Image (cartoon, helix red, strand yellow):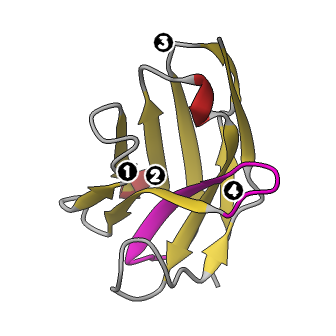
Amino acid sequence: QVHVVESGGGVVQAGGALRLSCAASGRSERVGWFRQLPGKEREFVAAINWSGVSTYYADSVKGRFTVSRDNAKSTVYLQMNSLKPEDTAIYYCAAARFVGSWDRDYDYWGQGTQVTVSS
């Protein structure tokens, strides 16, 4: 069993930055970030493998967001720069037991953290 807890959300002005943290106990082959707006489907944002060598991003955040991990602290980070109002959403962290597709088949989910970008 892997427990996943996100933190670091908040309110920021457009063009600003936030760093989200995901504390994930136990080993996870992949950790992904997803986001969801009210009434919309959850969408993939970014993911990282166990070693931290491989990462993958949605086109909408490529070049602005960076995912990293510190396995000694059992924590994955999502650094979000140049934030836009359309980045406003609840952000979820998810952990996967097995190697697989970057944007699906995750086993454990956090409760989410709200990110609001004001214009």
Q: Nearer the viewer, mark 1 or mark 3?
A: 3
How many labels sit on residues? Answer: 4
Residue type at mark 1 is Asp
* Disc 4 to disc 1, C-alpha distance: 15 Å
Kindly state the secondary structure of the residue where label 3 is placed. loop
Query: In this image, 107 relative to 56: left or right?
Result: right
Judging from the image, what secondary structure is the residue with disc 1 in? Answer: strand
Residue 102, disc: none
Which residues, given as a range, are shown in magenta? Answer: 24-41
Number of residues whose C-alpha sits closer than 10 Å to that of mark 2, classed few (under 14), some (14–19) or many (20 or more): many
Instruction: Name the spot of residue 47 as percent of width and height, x first.
Output: 39, 60
| Mark carried by residue 76 | 2
Q: Earlier in the sequence, mark 3 or mark 4?
A: 4
Report, in whole angstroms, how far the alpha carbon at label 1 lies from the one at label 2. 6 Å
**Residue 81 placement (x, y as % from top left):** 42, 23
Q: Are marks 1 and 2 in contact (CB under 8 Å)?
A: yes
Q: Which mark is residue 15?
A: 3
Residue in the picture at 42% in, 19% down: 82
Q: Which mark is residue 70?
A: 1
Q: Which is nearer the N-term, disc 4 or disc 1?
A: 4
The residue beneath circle 4 is 5
